[in-house]
Image (cartoon, grey):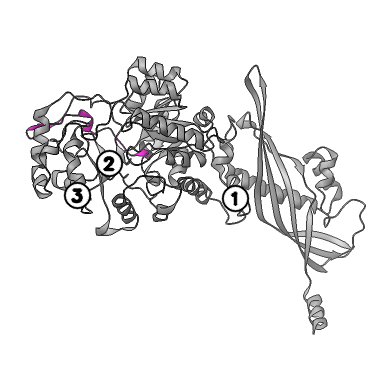
Amino acid sequence: MAWRDLRMIKRLGLRVPLLQAPMAGAQTSDLAIAVARGGGLGAIPCALLSPDAVREHVQHFRAATKDLSAPINLNFFCHTLPAADPIADKQWQDVLAPYYHEYDVDLTKLTAKGALRMPFDKVSLDLVRELKPEVVSFHFGLPSPQMLQDVKDTGAFVISSATTVREAQWLEERGCDAVIAQGLEAGGHRGVFLPREGGSNYRSDFQYRNSSMDFPRQTGTMALVPQIVDAIKLPVIAAGGIGDARGVLAASALGAAGVQMGTVFLLANETKTSQLHRETLKRAATATGEEAVETAITNVFSGRPARGFVTRVMRDLGPMCAAASEFPTAGAALGPLKTAAEEKGDTAFSSLCQPDHWSGINPEYLSWRGVNIVLRVLNGIPDFVNYSRAQPRIFALGAPDEVRNSMYVLSQFPTATRVRLPEFVEGAERAAHTVLQRLYSPEISETKEFLEQLATPDSLKALLYKPSAPLEGKQKAGNVVLEQLNVNTAVLSAVEYTSQTVNETVEREWLAFRVQYDVTEHLLISPKGEEGIEDRRAVNTSFMWTFEADVTKPEELEWAIVAATPFKEESAVLKTKEAQNDNKETEE
């Protein structure tokens, strides 16, 4: 497969267009390091971290990835802290009062702060200036225009999330460098930040205190991505419900410049995922029918909509509870209940973030390192590329992992023309069939003319002659006809990119693919000057060809053989029935 949009890969120097979703409270820099070693973009969520903690994590990341010069993404929230509202807080506590009684929670221990998530501010900006991350990403919109410009002045690549086309256009207009298209399936907090046109809804005696709780224009990832791709000119990153090679392929086909994944890493040993959360994730991966673990978008844990596993408090109060305090203060009233319940092994009040309709949870990931999860997802991509025949495949088992991964191969080259590897594979197979069949032509002059047109210089033409094929001036015992040719494997062993630059502008680009072939030729041998079949032979042949094309203009894309190795033959004799009987008598 080929990514249509390589702007983000080129800008950030990524090997693969995979972004690790920042997951506040569930990860540290260890996961970011693991993802970076897999070739993707690691992230550090800063909303719950002190400046010193952020500084420590970035220093750890830099030291651990020094050999890679890997980029890092610092993620911040851009919400506005609500004004103190003791009446609203009391309403929320009254709703939770029966649970306080059930779990013997001391109400005097309740605080207004709770797990406060701090928005991007001057302290955050000073950190960005000091640490100079390659990427700064935001959730819930963007900071003020001046702060955003100050961030961009550090050289940072700025990303933010959009849940609708309108939000994506808003981000583009204000200077974002890339947009995350967060589908409705995404786990964790919804990145929604523009109020619903027409205002908030009301229910009972409570006002929906956050108009972003309304979702009439929000859609799933695979519907949202192409809409945003068509609506803006920025690179678009698909997020939500993507956890395996199928999702990555789908996002690429829809025009995404990359994918962002989070939940796929929650079972990795570099995360801080609690044991209760891990057990729920594993159960969700295998449970079906009535035992299936459901997810829903809820505001009860923080005051803002977030998707997670359905728990008791969500079932009792409804996923979207109008009484919940504004973000992020709602979590303060729920915190003591969470602690008391989890001490008893109960997740009734735990925020267990999880995407909806996602098939990527793999219980095997429980003891895996993050870098191996990245490689598992990406190396699975060739398995989902459809071919017209079962064998052979360019992604043969003998190929190096990094070469088998078509995403890796094509991410290395900033070509304007996208080369589709499945199509190249079929073309390489057809080339082998065409050339070898012509080499066995009984008309020597036609073969010679064919090679003159196919290859230059003469040294290459010499390498394209087959030892077992008829040659000009060669005495043959009989005529040799190629009855059948099987291309067993065609392994991509190397790819090279070259370009011609004039005044810092790329004028022409070339790609060269080196393919190692293993073929079997079934030959018919007839007596010299006579008709009929005297013998059959099976010849196993290995050779290597290098194909090159000028990829500057897709409409003029033509591949030529520019290098070759001598044909190496190993003959397996398949004689006529009479000859086989003679051999059998000799053996007896």
Q: Nearer the viewer, residue 143 or 127?
A: 127
The tag on residue 307 is 2
Q: CA distance from mark 3 to mark 2?
A: 20 Å
Which residue is under mark 1?
A: 395
Left of 8 or right of it: where is 561? right
Circle 2 residues within 10 Å: few <14, some 14–19, many ≥20:
many
Circle 1 residues within 10 Å: few <14, some 14–19, many ≥20:
many
Residue at (21%, 45%) from the top-left corner? 339
Q: Nearer the viewer, residue 109 or 216?
A: 109
The amino acid sitting under disc 1 is: Phe
Which secondary structure is most common in the magenta stretch? loop
Residue at (18%, 25%) from the top-left corner? 199
Q: CA distance from mark 3 to mark 1?
A: 50 Å
Q: Earlier in the sequence, mark 3 or mark 2?
A: 2
Q: Is 450 situated above or below 344? A: above
Residue at (54%, 37%) from the top-left corner? 15
Circle 3 residues within 10 Å: few <14, some 14–19, many ≥20:
some
- State which quadrant residue 196 falls in: top left
The amino acid sitting under disc 2 is: Arg
Q: Earlier in the sequence, mark 3 or mark 1?
A: 3
Magenta residues span 199-221
Furthest-top residue in view?
146
x and y percent of residue 175 in the render? Answer: 40, 19
Quarter the C terminus occupies: bottom right
**Callout count:** 3
Q: Is 527 situated above or below 548? A: below
The tag on residue 341 is 3
Left of 47 or right of it: where is 158? right
Q: Are marks 3 and 2 in contact (CB under 8 Å)?
A: no
